[in-house]
Image: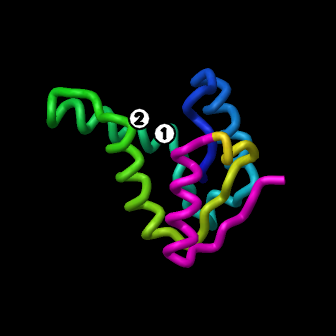
Amino acid sequence: MSGQITGLHPEEARKNFDRAAQHFDCERTAIIHPIEYAEGLIEKYLSKHGREMQEHEILLAELREIANVKMVFMLRGWEKSPGATIEKLFAEYCGKEIIYEL
């Protein structure tokens, strides 16, 4: 999933992704929840490197994940997010299916 995080209250962003995840049968489809994914990355990175990850480092990790998925689900409002815009362009470049939330 890809969508706006920056500029939103953290709980609002999480709620948007949680709502979007309900569109999928989680038993048949593995979903990468970007907030949960980033939280795990940040925790591992901090313990290993002793500093927080910067936004561009998180984005690079997310792009690596996009390279390995079949489809990217774009949440409403994705175009307000520079990171989601980059993820969409990268997914297109990689030939991934892109689905947009209505």
Q: Is residue 66 left or right of residue 43?
A: right
Amino acid marked by disc 2: Glu
Name the disc covering residue 65, or none.
none
**Where in the figure is residue 61, as x and y percent of width and height?**
36, 52
Where is residue 10? Give x, y as percent.
57, 24
Which secondary structure, mark 2? helix
* 84 versus 38 height, above or below: below
Residue at horizontal 60 percent and vertical 68 percent from the top = 71
- The residue located at (24%, 37%) in the rendering is 45
Determine the residue located farthest toward the left in the rendered image: 49
| Residue displayed at 36% across by 43% down | 56
Q: Residue at x 32, y 34 (%)?
A: 54
- In the image, the segment drawn in magenta is 81-102
Between 28 and 87, the one lying in front of the other is: 87
Say which residue label 2 marks.
Answer: 39
Pick out the residue farthest to the bottom: 95
Q: Callout 1: 10 Å neighbours few (<14), some, many (20+)?
A: few
Q: Which mark identifies residue 36?
A: 1
Residues at discs 1 and 2 in contact (Cβ within 8 Å): yes
Residue 18 covered by magenta stretch: no
Disc 2 residue crowd, few under 14, some 14–19, many 20+, Cα 10 Å = few
For the residue marked with disc 1, what is the amino acid? Glu
